[in-house]
Structure formats: C-alpha cells, structure tokens
Image: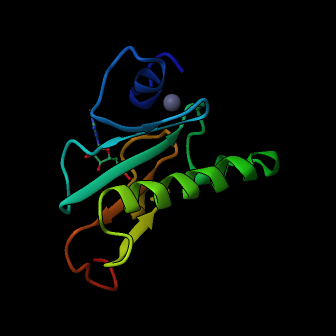
Amino acid sequence: MSDCLFCKMASGEIQPDVVYEDDEILAFRDINPQAPVHVLIIPKTHIATLNDLQPEQAPLVGRLFLAAKQIAAEEGIAERGYRTVFNCNAEAGQAVFHLHMHLLGGRPLGWPPG
Ligand code: 5GP
Ligand code: ZN
C-alpha cells in the first residue's frame, strides 16, 4: 500500500533501525520504545489488522513468532522474559494499520496492561 508507513519500510523507501530481515519479514526498533528492548516485527505484505488475517497466512504469523524468538535471544532477554503483543483497532491502541508484533523486554513488564 503506497501510503502505509510500514509498507514503505518493507520496500526500503524508509529505512528504520533494522534488527532482522528475510524475504517475508522485517523487524526494526520502535521509534518510541516502551522498554529497553522494543522491536516491531512486520510481514512485508500489507495486512491492515489482525481482523484481516487470512487462513493461508497462518504460516507467516508463525514465522513472525520465530523471528521474535531469535531476536529475543540476540537481544539477551530470552531467559529473563519478554512479551509479544499485537494491538488490534482502537481500544487496543493500534496506531499503524499494518500488522505488527511488538517484542518488549529488558525490564519487568506489568500485568495486566493498562
Ligand atoms: P501500535 O500502537 O499501532 O500497536 O504501534 C505502532 C508503533 O509504531 C508504536 O509503538 C510507535 O512508536 C511505532 N512507530 C510509529 N511510527 C514509527 C516510525 O516512523 N518508526 C518506527 N521505528 N516506529 C514507529
Ligand atoms: Zn502496509
């Protein structure tokens, strides 16, 4: 999608601080980190929200989690603990309408979230 911020990152038009990339996935540091480690992991294909996910995209979501696991290990938070979050629509605070997983860690994370 031409007017989507994360599509522009996926295509290389905008260059975030990338921590992982493969053919289908890009992961980069959040510009406004909520924890010492705050990485966004996105599919390169445009999916607006979790509500728009299709059954045939299930393997892609699995690969987002495998990327999260690898990044958590590389960032040194795998054993301490970390959180993965998908915000969907207004009440969850979704601000960018291109599916993304937040990977958060490096400090104790409260539960439940606010
Ligand atoms: P959401 O609220 O949609 O789940 O999360 C969107 C995230 O994208 C926020 O944590 C926000 O800080 C991050 N973000 C928004 N614009 C940019 C940007 O231009 N660069 C990066 N790296 N992160 C961004
Ligand atoms: Zn997009």
Q: Describe residue 102's horizontal placement relative to residue 33 as left or right.
A: right
Residues 51 and 105: in front is 105
Residue at image position (34%, 85%) is 112
| 6 in relation to 30, above or below | above
Q: Describe residue 17's horizontal placement relative to residue 81 as left or right.
A: left
Q: Position of residue 56 (x, y in %)?
A: 81, 46
| 112 in relation to 77, above or below | below
Residue at image position (47%, 26%) is 10
- Which colour scheme appears in the figure? rainbow
Work out which residue is located at the far bottom of the displayed protein and give it: 111
Residues 53 and 57: in front is 57
Q: Position of residue 86 (x, y in %)?
A: 48, 59
Work out which residue is located at the far right of the displayed protein and give it: 56
Q: Quadrant of ligand 1?
A: top left
| 78 in relation to 111, above or below | above
Q: How many marks?
A: 0
Q: Position of residue 2 (x, y in %)?
A: 49, 16
Q: Position of residue 9 (x, y in %)?
A: 40, 25
| 68 in relation to 3, above or below | below
The part of the image, by quadrant, that contains residue 6 is top left
Instruction: Specify whether residue 48 is in view.
Output: yes
Question: Which quarter shows the C terminus?
Answer: bottom left
The part of the image, by quadrant, that contains residue 73 is bottom left
Question: Which quarter shows the N terminus?
Answer: top right
Instruction: Specify whether residue 89 is in view.
Output: no
Residues 5 and 65: in front is 65
Residue at image position (44%, 65%) is 84
